[in-house]
Image (cartoon, grey):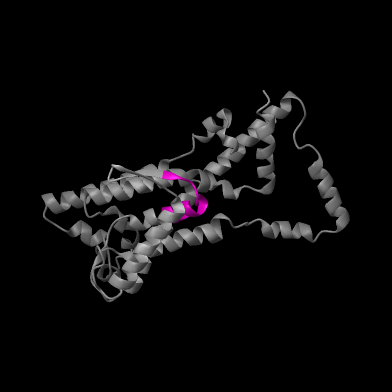
Amino acid sequence: MLYDRPYMRDDYQRERTSFLVWLLSATIAGFIVQNVVAIWFHSGSFAYFAALSAPALKSGFVWTLVTYPLLHAGVLHLLCVMLGVFFLGRELLPQLGERRLARLTFAAIAGGGLAWFALNFNRGGEVIGGTPILVCYLIVFACLFPNREISFLVFFILPVTTRPKYIAWVVLGVDLCGFLFSEIPGRDFVASAPYSAHLGGMLVGWLYFRYVHDADWTSLQRGVDIELPRWMKRRRKAAAAAPSLPAGAGRRDDLRAEVDRILDKINSHGFGALTAEEKRVLDEAKDLLSRR
């Protein structure tokens, strides 16, 4: 991609990561408060007011739809979820931008919570943990990079290389089996888990990729151009063919300033928010800035 070049990579790596830092910090802080209240004060009040459960929502604790990821079942649960969220989120951030990633995260939290509540409206139990965020990120990552090779160590010993699409299918299959054979009939399947919340997070991720990330929201504006008379379209084409930047040394400076603006837009809104003209400028800059 264009920002693999040294000049643009340095600017692009200044992308804001405050949301991921905030998310991880808030989750760790919630876990600390959860354990301090439970161990030192022998009270479950924090979990009562923060965990998602049917009685809590019926009592009007609507905030539990977004606070339940602050609690976890243990240190291992916290580490597994947060490490996955961090590494996947770091890969998604350049593609989505910080604002879209934040909205996707809260949508995954709310979607997972509502999916669980829809099935467990008249049941007991509660939901804690940020797994809906993790599986949502996984689905979006698998949709964006289905064939990227990933290598890791199983049990820190056995090296395995696979692709994101296979991991996503396996996770989806496990959660579907758990939903059908454990959560619906009320029996344990391998491990007790809120499978419906996981599926809700996955659905949010797929809906985002399918209808938001690749959606062309400027199509209506371009539709107006198509309806213009031919003679006007010819003039518009001629204007577009004219060089948009001055020739000579000034052209490179102006182009670099425009590339900086476009990279800032990618940082804020993701690559999918670029217009066709902005993508053309990036392609032109790749050739021009390489000739130094």
The foreground one among 135 and 47 is 135
Q: Residue at x 68, y 27 (%)?
A: 253
Magenta stretch holds residue 254: no
In this picture, which residue range is highlighted in magenta?
Answer: 137-150
Q: Say which quadrant the N terminus sits in.
A: top right
- Report the quarter where the C terminus lies: top right
* Displayed quadrant of residue 117: bottom left
Residue 148 horizontal side relative to residue 48, left or right: right
Q: Is residue 222 above or below residue 289?
A: below
Residue 128 shown left or right of residue 259 in the figure: left
What residue lies at 34% left-to-right and 68% top-to-bottom?
177
Who's the residue at 16% across and 59% down the image?
44
Location of residue 103 in the rendering, given as x and y in whole percent from the top left corner: 46, 54
The spot of residue 139 in percent (x, y) is 45, 56
Number of numbered discs on residues: 0
Position of 136 with respect to 273 (left or right) is left
Is residue 28 at all visible to an observer of this figure?
yes
Q: Is residue 111 visible?
A: no
Please tell me which residue lies in front, 70 or 181: 181
Snapshot quadrant of residue 132: bottom left
Q: Which x, y percent locates residue 217?
A: 62, 57
Q: From this view, report whether residue 167 is shown above or below residue 125.
A: above
144 inside magenta stretch: yes
